[in-house]
Image: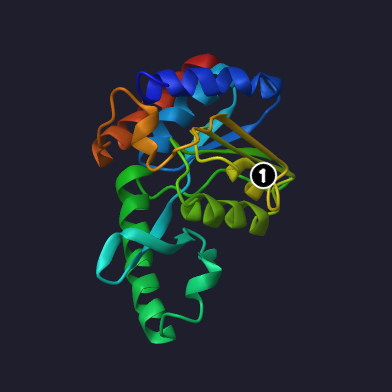
Amino acid sequence: MFKDREDAGKKLARALKNYKDKGTLVLGIPRGGAVVGYEVARYLNADFSIVISRKLPFPGNPEFGFGAIAEDGSLFILEEYEELLPRVLVDKIVEEQKAEIIRRILALRKGEGLPEIKGRTVILVDDGIAMGSTLRAAIFLCKNKHAQKIIAASPVSGEGMDKELLDIVDEAVILEKPAFFKAVAQGYQDWRDVSDEEVAGIIKKWKIYAKNLEL
């Protein structure tokens, strides 16, 4: 479907062209969403940053998440697991992910806070949506910070995800929704892990780009 995340970002940006030159804020969800979000922000002539949202890994199966937490403490837990997992265990996992969020803010944004969200149109971008937990936690962060309008945007997800998201966002833009969707990697020819260093480099590159626009 997409050559790589850069290709996906450029195609997603065109689907969001109605927000071009509108003072929109694009927030990528790292790591992969930072790559896609950068391309979206450039095309839209928008502001850009990253928002940290961490999966809550299921005990004994860290690849599976039972929820997520965003950097302001906004918490999303899948309904079927709210009563299944002991509260003390959930609290322990949440605290572990809060520590990782702090580490990532320092490593990726060099400790800088988020841009102003209140009263703004915010486009939340990820490189793909599987369960959607990290995206939902980031959506709740934007709601808590009183965004005027929230758009969830991604190159690929399973069928029906856009309809699910419309319960909590104003708009959902997803380019590809394959019928037999199992993993985000299905949407990409070139799928690789994105490093902290690459995300930090994207933020640095954006600052140089934005500064040059001001000159």
Residue 201 versus residue 139 in the image, above or below: above
Q: Amino acid at mark 1?
A: Lys
- Towards the viewer: 67 or 91: 67
- What residue sits 40% from the left and 29% below the top? 187
Q: Position of residue 25 (x, y in %)?
A: 60, 35
Name the residue rendered at 62%, 21% in the picture. 15
Q: Residues within 10 Å of mark 1 (few under 14, many from 20)?
A: few
- Residue 211 seen in the figure: no
Q: How is the image coloured?
A: rainbow
Q: Is residue 77 left or right of residue 55?
A: right
Identify the residue shown where x is 68% and y is 28%.
Answer: 23
Q: Is residue 116 above or below residue 125?
A: below
Quick one: quadrant of the N terminus? Answer: top left
- Secondary structure beneath label 1: helix
Is residue 18 at least partly visible in the picture?
A: yes
77 w.r.t. 149: above or below: below
Point out residue 129 in the picture as x, y percentages from the top left corner.
47, 43
Residue corresponding to mark 1: 163
Front-most of residues 129 and 149: 129
In the rendering, at what x and y percent does residue 28 appear?
Answer: 47, 38
Q: On the rendered structure, is 198 left or right of 73?
A: left
How many circles with numbers are drawn on the protein?
Answer: 1
Quarter occupied by residue 194: top left
User: Residue 73 in the image: x percent, y percent?
Assistant: 51, 65
Would residue 190 be found to the left or right of residue 109 on screen?
left
